[in-house]
Image: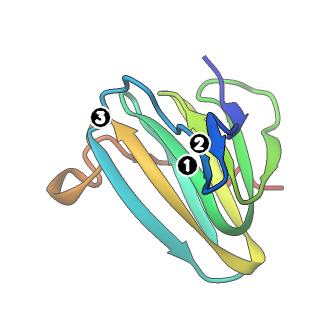
Amino acid sequence: NFMKLKKLKIDFKDKRGSISDIFYKKNIEHVAIIKSKPNVRRGDHYHKRTTQWMLMTQGSMEYWYKPLKSKAKAKMKVLNVGDLIETPPNEMHALKIGKNGNEFIVFTIGKRGGKDYEADTFRFQPTIIR
C-alpha cells in the first residue's frame, strides 16, 4: 500500500452549484482542520495502524513519503486546493508547507484525535524532505 492522490470530481451538478463526494461508506473516526504558517515543516512521522487522508482547502504543500523500511529516497507530490491524499500505515511522511501557508482537513481511521493524538504517531529523524 502506497500513498494515493485523488482529484475530487463533481458527483452532482445543477444550476445551484455542485457536490463532490469526499468519502462514501468509509468509517471515519476523527476529523481535524490543520492550519500552517508559510514555509514550515510538519510530519516527520509514520503511523503503525492509522490511515489518514488530507484534503487541501487553502494554499499548497510538498508531500514527501516513502515506505517505512525502504532504503530508497523519498518521493514528493505537490498538493494544491482540492487534492486528497491518502497515507496508509507504515508510510513515512513529511510536509513542507507552501510560501503562502495552507489549510487542510485530516480524516482518520485509527487513533489520532483528542487524548489519542500521539497514540499511533512515531517520529523519525532526519527528515525525508530534500
Task: Looking at the picture, tell me which residue is in the foreground, 8 or 73.
Answer: 8
Q: Residue 48 occupies which quadrant of the picture?
A: top left
Q: CA distance from mark 3 to mark 1?
A: 14 Å
Q: Residues within 10 Å of mark 3 (few under 14, many from 20)?
A: many
What x and y, as percent, mark residue 4?
A: 67, 29
Mark sitting earlier along the chain (3/1): 1
* Residue for badge 2: 20
Residue 19: image x %, image y %? 57, 45
Identify whether 26 is placed above or below 102. Answer: above
From the image, tell me which residue sits under label 3.
Answer: 110
Please say which color scheme the image uses.
Answer: rainbow
Residue 81 horizontal side relative to residue 22, left or right: right
Quick one: 83 or 64, which is closer to the camera? 83
Who's the residue at 34% across and 52% down the image?
Answer: 31
Residue to which mark 1 is pinned: 54
Amino acid found under the numbered disc labelled 1: Met
